[in-house]
Amino acid sequence: MKRSWSSRFVESFDSAFHELKVEYQEAPFRFLTKWDIVSDLHSKLKVLSDLEEVETGRFTIGKDGRWRQKSYRTDPISTSPIHLGIGFVKDEKMKADISYIDLRSMQFAVTARFGKKRPTSMASWRFSSGAGISVLLNMDVQYAKRKNSQTGRFSKTDGLKELEKEAIKELFNLRMWDRSILLLVDNHGLYTKNDLETSFSRRLKPYTMKMYYLSPKSGFFITGKRR
């Protein structure tokens, strides 16, 4: 039985994460920006990048913006399931840094038939299912808690609160995907697994979302809890 696209995606990301963990913990500052990490992950996920045929590239777009089925046959289009920063439709603001598309749901609108003298001119695309990966890198926030000099109680620092707001925003954008992963790379090791679950587990959709955490001394993931 052929494995589902989602199983292949999850297994491939797990493998890529373990490779990334070894490299990062050997030399964290090989990654100076989040895009260094995104690029590295994309290269590690090349096992997913084989070209596949899209059977539904038989549409055109009218001046009114509506998609119409072509009355004549066009040759299938081939593309990779994995891409950097694309939305569900062309020109949509990206909702993930890396996208893995279920190509069975993908459609292309083309303005010309495929041929040696007249290659396909792609006008647009759309798809309905897939997976998204976003990366968040913390190099700035160094302290997780502060102590109130009057009460002696500890609370989250303002920097950590801002970092968590950014993570929550990323998780919100990822909720539209059938499968999604947020990778938090934290140079200052602010979280234990229990801390991460306390802050984010209820923000993750059970079964479809994961949050991976990587610091110079640890690496793990959490999943969502049913309310």
Image (cartoon, grey):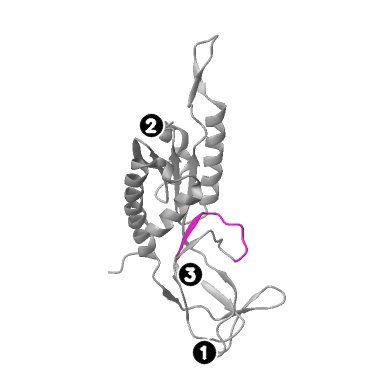
User: Is there a contact, CB below 8 Å, between mark 1 and mark 2?
Assistant: no
Q: Which residue is mark 1?
A: 116
Looking at the rendered structure, the number of numbered marks drawn on it comes to 3
Q: Nearer the viewer, residue 155 or 47?
A: 47
Q: Which residues are drawn in magenta?
A: 90-101
Mark 3 crowd level (few <14, some 14–19, many ≥20, 10 Å Cα): some
**47 left or right, relative to 165:** left
Q: Is residue 79 visible?
A: yes
Residue at 37 percent across and 42 percent down: it is 27
Mark 2 crowd level (few <14, some 14–19, many ≥20, 10 Å Cα): some
Q: Which residue is mark 3?
A: 105
Residue 32 at x, y percent in the picture: 48, 44
Q: Amino acid at mark 1?
A: Lys
Which secondary structure, mark 2?
loop
Q: Which residue is mark 2?
A: 192
As drawn, 62 above or below 14: below
Residue at 47 percent across and 82 percent down: it is 76
Which secondary structure, mark 3?
helix
Mark 1 vs mark 3, CA separation in Å: 27 Å
The image's mark for residue 85 is none
Residue 108 at x, y percent in the picture: 55, 75
Which secondary structure, mark 1?
loop
